Image (cartoon, rainbow, N blue to C red):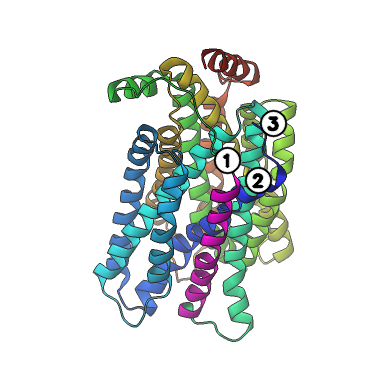
Protein backbone atom coordinates (compact mmCIF):
# COMPACT_ATOMS: atom_id res chain seq x y z
CA UNK A 1 0.00 0.00 0.00
CA UNK A 2 1.33 3.44 -0.94
CA UNK A 3 0.04 6.51 0.88
CA UNK A 4 -0.69 9.70 -1.00
CA UNK A 5 1.05 12.84 0.20
CA UNK A 6 -2.20 14.14 1.69
CA UNK A 7 -2.79 10.90 3.61
CA UNK A 8 0.82 10.81 4.79
CA UNK A 9 0.56 14.42 5.99
CA UNK A 10 -2.68 13.64 7.84
CA UNK A 11 -1.09 10.60 9.46
CA UNK A 12 2.14 12.25 10.62
CA UNK A 13 0.34 15.41 11.82
CA UNK A 14 -0.61 13.43 14.94
CA UNK A 15 3.04 13.65 15.96
CA UNK A 16 2.98 17.45 16.42
CA UNK A 17 0.82 17.59 19.58
CA UNK A 18 2.33 14.31 20.81
CA UNK A 19 5.80 15.91 20.66
CA UNK A 20 4.47 18.87 22.61
CA UNK A 21 4.11 16.58 25.62
CA UNK A 22 7.60 15.06 25.69
CA UNK A 23 9.86 18.04 26.35
CA UNK A 24 7.73 19.83 29.01
CA UNK A 25 7.49 16.66 31.10
CA UNK A 26 11.28 16.68 31.40
CA UNK A 27 12.17 20.38 31.26
CA UNK A 28 9.26 22.59 32.35
CA UNK A 29 6.66 20.72 34.42
CA UNK A 30 8.91 19.53 37.31
CA UNK A 31 10.17 23.05 38.22
CA UNK A 32 6.68 24.48 37.61
CA UNK A 33 5.08 22.18 40.19
CA UNK A 34 8.04 22.17 42.57
CA UNK A 35 8.49 25.95 42.71
CA UNK A 36 5.54 27.91 41.35
CA UNK A 37 2.86 25.46 42.52
CA UNK A 38 4.68 24.96 45.84
CA UNK A 39 4.81 21.15 45.99
CA UNK A 40 8.55 21.03 46.71
CA UNK A 41 11.46 19.25 45.04
CA UNK A 42 11.21 15.97 46.95
CA UNK A 43 7.50 15.41 46.33
CA UNK A 44 7.69 16.38 42.66
CA UNK A 45 10.76 14.20 42.14
CA UNK A 46 9.00 11.12 43.55
CA UNK A 47 5.79 11.79 41.61
CA UNK A 48 7.55 12.15 38.28
CA UNK A 49 9.69 9.08 38.94
CA UNK A 50 6.66 6.91 39.87
CA UNK A 51 4.66 8.03 36.86
CA UNK A 52 7.62 7.53 34.52
CA UNK A 53 8.10 3.94 35.70
CA UNK A 54 4.36 3.41 35.25
CA UNK A 55 4.67 4.72 31.70
CA UNK A 56 7.55 2.34 30.96
CA UNK A 57 5.68 -0.65 32.39
CA UNK A 58 2.42 -0.23 30.49
CA UNK A 59 3.93 0.14 26.99
CA UNK A 60 4.48 -3.57 26.16
CA UNK A 61 1.37 -4.58 28.14
CA UNK A 62 -0.83 -2.28 26.10
CA UNK A 63 0.92 -3.32 22.88
CA UNK A 64 0.03 -6.96 23.54
CA UNK A 65 -3.55 -6.02 24.44
CA UNK A 66 -4.01 -3.93 21.30
CA UNK A 67 -2.66 -6.72 19.08
CA UNK A 68 -5.02 -9.32 20.49
CA UNK A 69 -8.31 -7.45 20.23
CA UNK A 70 -9.63 -5.83 17.07
CA UNK A 71 -12.99 -4.25 16.24
CA UNK A 72 -15.04 -3.76 13.11
CA UNK A 73 -13.61 -0.25 12.99
CA UNK A 74 -10.04 -1.58 12.95
CA UNK A 75 -7.39 -2.52 15.43
CA UNK A 76 -5.55 0.81 15.86
CA UNK A 77 -8.09 3.57 15.25
CA UNK A 78 -10.41 2.80 18.20
CA UNK A 79 -7.54 3.17 20.68
CA UNK A 80 -6.49 6.49 19.12
CA UNK A 81 -10.09 7.73 19.29
CA UNK A 82 -10.22 6.68 22.96
CA UNK A 83 -6.90 8.41 23.67
CA UNK A 84 -8.15 11.75 22.33
CA UNK A 85 -10.52 12.76 25.17
CA UNK A 86 -8.19 11.26 27.79
CA UNK A 87 -5.28 13.35 26.53
CA UNK A 88 -7.25 16.55 26.04
CA UNK A 89 -8.63 16.50 29.58
CA UNK A 90 -5.46 15.35 31.35
CA UNK A 91 -3.18 17.73 29.44
CA UNK A 92 -5.34 20.69 30.39
CA UNK A 93 -5.48 19.61 34.04
CA UNK A 94 -1.69 19.17 34.17
CA UNK A 95 -0.63 22.21 32.16
CA UNK A 96 -3.28 24.68 33.34
CA UNK A 97 -4.20 23.85 36.95
CA UNK A 98 -6.75 26.15 38.54
CA UNK A 99 -5.41 27.60 41.77
CA UNK A 100 -3.34 25.57 44.21
CA UNK A 101 -3.05 21.81 43.85
CA UNK A 102 -2.00 18.85 46.00
CA UNK A 103 0.51 16.05 45.48
CA UNK A 104 -2.30 13.60 44.73
CA UNK A 105 -3.71 15.95 42.08
CA UNK A 106 -0.45 15.90 40.14
CA UNK A 107 0.04 12.14 40.62
CA UNK A 108 -3.44 11.19 39.42
CA UNK A 109 -3.52 13.47 36.38
CA UNK A 110 -0.01 12.48 35.29
CA UNK A 111 -0.99 8.81 35.47
CA UNK A 112 -4.11 9.47 33.39
CA UNK A 113 -2.09 11.48 30.88
CA UNK A 114 0.43 8.64 30.50
CA UNK A 115 -2.41 6.18 29.83
CA UNK A 116 -3.72 8.38 27.01
CA UNK A 117 -0.20 8.93 25.70
CA UNK A 118 0.49 5.18 25.59
CA UNK A 119 -2.83 4.45 23.87
CA UNK A 120 -2.03 7.03 21.21
CA UNK A 121 1.70 6.57 20.58
CA UNK A 122 1.85 2.75 20.53
CA UNK A 123 -1.26 2.57 18.33
CA UNK A 124 0.11 5.17 15.89
CA UNK A 125 3.47 3.39 15.61
CA UNK A 126 1.85 -0.03 15.13
CA UNK A 127 -0.46 1.51 12.52
CA UNK A 128 2.56 2.96 10.70
CA UNK A 129 4.14 -0.51 10.41
CA UNK A 130 0.96 -1.79 8.75
CA UNK A 131 0.51 1.20 6.42
CA UNK A 132 3.81 0.63 4.60
CA UNK A 133 5.19 -2.83 3.86
CA UNK A 134 8.10 -1.95 1.54
CA UNK A 135 11.60 -1.67 3.08
CA UNK A 136 12.24 1.91 1.91
CA UNK A 137 8.60 3.05 2.13
CA UNK A 138 8.73 2.37 5.85
CA UNK A 139 11.73 4.65 6.16
CA UNK A 140 9.79 7.37 4.32
CA UNK A 141 6.81 7.08 6.67
CA UNK A 142 8.93 7.00 9.82
CA UNK A 143 11.10 9.86 8.56
CA UNK A 144 8.04 12.01 7.90
CA UNK A 145 6.64 11.14 11.32
CA UNK A 146 9.94 12.08 12.98
CA UNK A 147 10.01 15.39 11.09
CA UNK A 148 6.53 16.16 12.46
CA UNK A 149 7.75 15.27 15.94
CA UNK A 150 10.63 17.70 15.51
CA UNK A 151 8.24 20.46 14.40
CA UNK A 152 6.22 19.94 17.57
CA UNK A 153 9.37 19.85 19.69
CA UNK A 154 10.76 23.06 18.20
CA UNK A 155 7.40 24.81 18.62
CA UNK A 156 7.34 23.91 22.30
CA UNK A 157 10.81 25.44 22.64
CA UNK A 158 9.65 28.62 20.91
CA UNK A 159 6.41 29.15 22.92
CA UNK A 160 8.17 30.04 26.23
CA UNK A 161 10.51 32.39 24.35
CA UNK A 162 7.51 34.21 22.84
CA UNK A 163 6.00 34.70 26.30
CA UNK A 164 9.31 36.12 27.54
CA UNK A 165 9.55 38.54 24.60
CA UNK A 166 5.98 39.77 25.22
CA UNK A 167 6.69 40.51 28.88
CA UNK A 168 4.98 37.51 30.51
CA UNK A 169 7.86 35.36 31.78
CA UNK A 170 5.84 33.52 34.49
CA UNK A 171 6.14 29.76 34.17
CA UNK A 172 2.38 29.38 34.76
CA UNK A 173 1.67 31.44 31.62
CA UNK A 174 4.17 29.44 29.59
CA UNK A 175 2.64 26.13 30.70
CA UNK A 176 -0.85 27.37 29.88
CA UNK A 177 0.38 28.43 26.41
CA UNK A 178 1.88 24.98 25.77
CA UNK A 179 -1.32 23.39 27.09
CA UNK A 180 -3.43 25.39 24.61
CA UNK A 181 -1.07 24.37 21.79
CA UNK A 182 -1.51 20.67 22.58
CA UNK A 183 -5.24 20.72 23.36
CA UNK A 184 -6.14 22.64 20.19
CA UNK A 185 -4.03 20.47 17.87
CA UNK A 186 -5.00 17.09 19.34
CA UNK A 187 -8.55 16.92 17.91
CA UNK A 188 -7.56 18.54 14.60
CA UNK A 189 -4.73 16.11 13.85
CA UNK A 190 -6.24 12.96 15.35
CA UNK A 191 -9.60 13.40 13.60
CA UNK A 192 -7.84 14.13 10.30
CA UNK A 193 -5.85 10.90 10.55
CA UNK A 194 -8.84 8.83 11.64
CA UNK A 195 -10.99 10.20 8.81
CA UNK A 196 -8.54 10.29 5.90
CA UNK A 197 -5.96 7.56 6.50
CA UNK A 198 -7.04 3.95 5.94
CA UNK A 199 -6.23 1.19 8.36
CA UNK A 200 -4.80 -1.69 6.37
CA UNK A 201 -6.54 -5.01 6.81
CA UNK A 202 -4.06 -7.57 8.04
CA UNK A 203 -4.57 -11.23 7.07
CA UNK A 204 -3.36 -13.47 9.88
CA UNK A 205 -4.11 -16.73 11.59
CA UNK A 206 -6.32 -16.88 14.69
CA UNK A 207 -5.08 -15.40 17.93
CA UNK A 208 -1.87 -16.85 19.26
CA UNK A 209 -1.43 -18.02 22.84
CA UNK A 210 0.60 -15.69 25.02
CA UNK A 211 3.31 -18.37 25.36
CA UNK A 212 3.74 -18.29 21.56
CA UNK A 213 4.16 -14.53 21.71
CA UNK A 214 6.82 -14.74 24.43
CA UNK A 215 8.63 -17.52 22.55
CA UNK A 216 8.69 -15.42 19.38
CA UNK A 217 10.08 -12.42 21.25
CA UNK A 218 12.79 -14.40 23.00
CA UNK A 219 13.77 -16.24 19.82
CA UNK A 220 14.11 -13.15 17.62
CA UNK A 221 17.78 -12.30 17.11
CA UNK A 222 17.03 -9.09 15.14
CA UNK A 223 14.76 -7.93 17.97
CA UNK A 224 17.39 -8.51 20.65
CA UNK A 225 20.05 -6.63 18.71
CA UNK A 226 17.78 -3.72 17.87
CA UNK A 227 16.61 -3.31 21.47
CA UNK A 228 20.23 -3.33 22.70
CA UNK A 229 21.18 -0.70 20.13
CA UNK A 230 18.12 1.39 20.99
CA UNK A 231 18.94 1.23 24.70
CA UNK A 232 22.55 2.30 24.07
CA UNK A 233 21.61 5.22 21.81
CA UNK A 234 18.77 6.30 24.10
CA UNK A 235 21.12 6.24 27.08
CA UNK A 236 23.70 8.22 25.11
CA UNK A 237 21.11 10.85 24.18
CA UNK A 238 19.97 11.00 27.79
CA UNK A 239 23.51 11.53 29.04
CA UNK A 240 24.12 14.33 26.53
CA UNK A 241 20.77 15.93 27.30
CA UNK A 242 21.24 15.80 31.07
CA UNK A 243 24.66 17.48 30.80
CA UNK A 244 24.09 20.03 28.03
CA UNK A 245 22.93 22.81 30.40
CA UNK A 246 26.08 22.37 32.53
CA UNK A 247 28.29 22.20 29.43
CA UNK A 248 26.83 25.44 28.07
CA UNK A 249 26.75 27.33 31.35
CA UNK A 250 29.92 26.11 33.06
CA UNK A 251 32.29 24.51 30.53
CA UNK A 252 31.51 26.94 27.68
CA UNK A 253 30.98 29.84 30.16
CA UNK A 254 27.90 31.05 28.28
CA UNK A 255 25.55 31.68 31.20
CA UNK A 256 21.89 30.95 30.53
CA UNK A 257 22.10 30.56 26.77
CA UNK A 258 21.57 26.82 26.68
CA UNK A 259 18.04 27.33 25.28
CA UNK A 260 19.42 28.84 22.06
CA UNK A 261 21.95 26.02 21.74
CA UNK A 262 19.22 23.39 22.24
CA UNK A 263 17.08 25.06 19.58
CA UNK A 264 19.97 24.93 17.10
CA UNK A 265 20.56 21.28 17.99
CA UNK A 266 16.96 20.29 17.25
CA UNK A 267 16.60 22.44 14.11
CA UNK A 268 19.67 20.88 12.52
CA UNK A 269 18.45 17.43 13.52
CA UNK A 270 15.14 18.12 11.81
CA UNK A 271 16.70 19.37 8.58
CA UNK A 272 19.06 16.36 8.50
CA UNK A 273 16.22 13.82 8.31
CA UNK A 274 16.13 13.76 4.45
CA UNK A 275 19.86 13.02 4.45
CA UNK A 276 19.44 9.96 6.66
CA UNK A 277 16.52 8.76 4.53
CA UNK A 278 18.71 9.12 1.43
CA UNK A 279 21.63 7.29 3.09
CA UNK A 280 19.39 4.41 4.22
CA UNK A 281 18.19 4.00 0.63
CA UNK A 282 21.72 4.04 -0.77
CA UNK A 283 22.89 1.54 1.83
CA UNK A 284 20.54 0.01 4.41
CA UNK A 285 18.93 1.27 7.58
CA UNK A 286 21.33 -0.38 10.00
CA UNK A 287 24.31 0.80 7.92
CA UNK A 288 23.04 4.40 8.06
CA UNK A 289 22.68 4.05 11.83
CA UNK A 290 26.23 2.75 12.16
CA UNK A 291 27.48 5.78 10.22
CA UNK A 292 25.51 8.01 12.60
CA UNK A 293 27.38 6.43 15.53
CA UNK A 294 30.72 6.88 13.75
CA UNK A 295 29.92 10.54 13.05
CA UNK A 296 29.18 11.17 16.74
CA UNK A 297 32.38 9.38 17.76
CA UNK A 298 34.44 11.60 15.45
CA UNK A 299 32.76 14.83 16.59
CA UNK A 300 32.69 14.27 20.37
CA UNK A 301 36.45 14.85 20.98
CA UNK A 302 36.09 18.37 19.53
CA UNK A 303 34.31 19.35 22.76
CA UNK A 304 37.57 18.74 24.63
CA UNK A 305 39.20 21.70 22.89
CA UNK A 306 36.18 24.05 22.78
CA UNK A 307 37.16 27.65 23.65
CA UNK A 308 35.21 28.92 26.70
CA UNK A 309 33.20 32.10 26.24
CA UNK A 310 32.91 31.79 22.47
CA UNK A 311 29.16 31.60 21.76
CA UNK A 312 29.44 31.14 18.00
CA UNK A 313 31.96 28.33 18.27
CA UNK A 314 29.68 26.58 20.78
CA UNK A 315 26.66 27.14 18.55
CA UNK A 316 28.39 25.55 15.55
CA UNK A 317 29.59 22.58 17.60
CA UNK A 318 26.18 21.91 19.15
CA UNK A 319 24.45 22.32 15.78
CA UNK A 320 26.82 19.81 14.15
CA UNK A 321 26.33 17.49 17.12
CA UNK A 322 22.58 17.55 16.42
CA UNK A 323 22.93 16.27 12.84
CA UNK A 324 22.37 12.55 13.73
CA UNK A 325 19.83 13.30 16.51
CA UNK A 326 16.75 12.12 14.59
CA UNK A 327 18.42 9.24 12.72
CA UNK A 328 17.92 6.49 15.29
CA UNK A 329 14.50 7.77 16.30
CA UNK A 330 12.94 6.97 12.94
CA UNK A 331 15.33 4.41 11.41
CA UNK A 332 14.98 2.10 14.40
CA UNK A 333 11.20 2.34 14.16
CA UNK A 334 11.41 1.46 10.47
CA UNK A 335 13.66 -1.49 11.36
CA UNK A 336 11.19 -2.60 14.02
CA UNK A 337 8.46 -2.59 11.38
CA UNK A 338 10.64 -4.99 9.36
CA UNK A 339 11.06 -7.19 12.42
CA UNK A 340 7.27 -7.50 12.68
CA UNK A 341 7.38 -9.12 9.22
CA UNK A 342 9.83 -11.70 10.55
CA UNK A 343 7.53 -12.31 13.49
CA UNK A 344 4.48 -12.62 11.22
CA UNK A 345 6.20 -15.29 9.12
CA UNK A 346 7.10 -17.29 12.24
CA UNK A 347 3.84 -16.86 14.20
CA UNK A 348 1.28 -16.08 11.52
CA UNK A 349 0.22 -12.89 13.32
CA UNK A 350 0.93 -9.17 12.95
CA UNK A 351 1.98 -8.07 16.43
CA UNK A 352 3.32 -4.58 15.83
CA UNK A 353 1.77 -3.27 19.04
CA UNK A 354 3.85 -5.39 21.37
CA UNK A 355 7.02 -4.86 19.33
CA UNK A 356 6.70 -1.08 19.31
CA UNK A 357 5.77 -1.23 22.98
CA UNK A 358 9.12 -2.90 23.66
CA UNK A 359 10.95 -0.31 21.55
CA UNK A 360 9.28 2.54 23.44
CA UNK A 361 10.20 0.85 26.71
CA UNK A 362 13.93 0.52 25.96
CA UNK A 363 14.20 4.16 24.83
CA UNK A 364 12.45 5.38 27.97
CA UNK A 365 14.63 3.17 30.18
CA UNK A 366 17.72 4.64 28.55
CA UNK A 367 16.53 8.19 29.13
CA UNK A 368 15.54 7.40 32.72
CA UNK A 369 18.88 5.74 33.53
CA UNK A 370 20.86 8.65 32.12
CA UNK A 371 20.24 11.03 35.02
CA UNK A 372 20.72 8.26 37.57
CA UNK A 373 24.15 7.51 36.09
CA UNK A 374 25.46 10.97 35.20
CA UNK A 375 24.53 12.96 38.32
CA UNK A 376 26.33 10.64 40.77
CA UNK A 377 29.34 10.69 38.43
CA UNK A 378 29.25 14.49 38.43
CA UNK A 379 29.36 14.46 42.20
CA UNK A 380 32.20 11.92 42.16
CA UNK A 381 34.38 14.10 39.92
CA UNK A 382 33.80 17.11 42.20
CA UNK A 383 31.43 19.11 40.02
CA UNK A 384 28.90 21.24 41.93
CA UNK A 385 25.92 23.28 40.79
CA UNK A 386 25.38 26.88 41.85
CA UNK A 387 29.07 27.48 42.63
CA UNK A 388 32.22 28.38 40.74
CA UNK A 389 33.86 25.07 39.81
CA UNK A 390 37.62 24.71 39.50
CA UNK A 391 39.41 23.71 36.29
CA UNK A 392 39.66 20.04 37.31
CA UNK A 393 35.88 19.76 37.87
CA UNK A 394 35.11 21.48 34.56
CA UNK A 395 37.55 19.21 32.73
CA UNK A 396 35.89 16.20 34.37
CA UNK A 397 32.49 17.47 33.22
CA UNK A 398 33.64 17.69 29.60
CA UNK A 399 35.34 14.29 29.79
CA UNK A 400 32.09 12.76 31.06
CA UNK A 401 30.14 14.46 28.26
CA UNK A 402 32.57 13.00 25.69
CA UNK A 403 33.66 9.59 26.97
CA UNK A 404 30.44 8.06 28.28
CA UNK A 405 28.41 8.73 25.10
CA UNK A 406 31.40 7.61 23.01
CA UNK A 407 31.41 4.19 24.71
CA UNK A 408 27.64 3.90 24.24
CA UNK A 409 27.90 4.79 20.54
CA UNK A 410 30.51 2.03 20.07
CA UNK A 411 28.24 -0.52 21.78
CA UNK A 412 25.30 0.56 19.62
CA UNK A 413 27.36 0.22 16.44
CA UNK A 414 28.51 -3.27 17.48
CA UNK A 415 24.90 -4.34 18.10
CA UNK A 416 23.95 -3.12 14.62
CA UNK A 417 26.97 -4.63 12.87
CA UNK A 418 25.87 -7.23 10.28
CA UNK A 419 22.26 -6.81 11.33
CA UNK A 420 20.49 -9.94 9.99
CA UNK A 421 17.41 -8.25 8.51
CA UNK A 422 18.27 -6.04 5.54
CA UNK A 423 16.47 -5.03 2.34
CA UNK A 424 16.70 -8.39 0.56
CA UNK A 425 15.67 -10.40 3.62
CA UNK A 426 12.68 -8.12 4.26
CA UNK A 427 11.44 -8.48 0.68
CA UNK A 428 11.63 -12.27 1.00
CA UNK A 429 9.57 -12.05 4.17
CA UNK A 430 6.92 -9.91 2.47
CA UNK A 431 6.67 -12.41 -0.38
CA UNK A 432 6.07 -15.23 2.12
CA UNK A 433 3.41 -13.18 3.93
CA UNK A 434 1.61 -12.26 0.72
CA UNK A 435 1.80 -15.83 -0.59
CA UNK A 436 0.31 -17.14 2.64
CA UNK A 437 -2.43 -14.50 2.56
Q: Position of residue 103 (x, y in %)?
A: 26, 70
Q: Is residue 6 left or right of residue 60?
A: right
Query: Up-down: is 240 above or below 219?
Result: below
Q: Position of residue 151 (x, y in %)?
A: 64, 57
Q: Nearer the viewer, residue 193 or 47?
A: 193
Does label 3 or label 1 sit earlier along the sequence? Answer: 1
What element does badge 3 sit on?
A: helix
Q: Position of residue 170 (x, y in %)?
A: 49, 82
Q: Local crowd at mark 2 within 10 Å, few (<14), some, or many (≥20)?
A: some
Label number found at residue 280: 3
Disc number lying in front (3 or 2): 2
Residue lying at 34% horizontally and 61% vertically, measured from the top left: 110
Q: Nearer the viewer, residue 300 or 202?
A: 202
Does label 2 or label 1 sit earlier along the sequence? Answer: 2
Residue lying at 49% horizontally and 66% vertically, measured from the top left: 183
- Magenta stretch bounds: 172-197
Instruction: Tell me the distance, in whole angstroms, between the alpha carbons under discs 3 and 1.
Output: 26 Å
Question: Do residues under tags 2 and 1 come within 8 Å of each other at their CB atoms?
Answer: yes
What element does badge 1 sit on?
A: loop
Q: Local crowd at mark 1 within 10 Å, few (<14), some, or many (≥20)?
A: some
Label number found at residue 7: 2
What element does badge 2 sit on?
A: helix
Question: Do residues under tags 3 and 2 come within 8 Å of each other at their CB atoms?
Answer: no
Q: Is residue 314 visible?
A: yes
Residue lying at 42% horizontally and 67% vertically, measured from the top left: 29
Quarter of the image holding residue 385? bottom left
Label number found at residue 198: 1
Quarter of the image holding residue 362? top left
Residue 87 part of the magenta segment: no
Amino acid sequence: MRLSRASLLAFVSQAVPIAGLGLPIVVYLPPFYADEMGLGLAAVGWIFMITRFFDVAIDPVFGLLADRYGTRFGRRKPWIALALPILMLSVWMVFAPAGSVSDSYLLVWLLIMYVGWTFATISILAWSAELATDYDARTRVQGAYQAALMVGLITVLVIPAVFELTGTPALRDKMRGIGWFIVVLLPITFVAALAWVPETKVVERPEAHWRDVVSALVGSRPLRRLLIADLMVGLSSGVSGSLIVFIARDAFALGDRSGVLMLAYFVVGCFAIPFWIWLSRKAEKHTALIWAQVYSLVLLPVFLVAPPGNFWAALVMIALFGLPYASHRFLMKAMMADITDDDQVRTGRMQAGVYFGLLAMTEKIGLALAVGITYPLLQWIGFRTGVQNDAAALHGLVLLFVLLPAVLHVLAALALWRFPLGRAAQRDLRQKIETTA
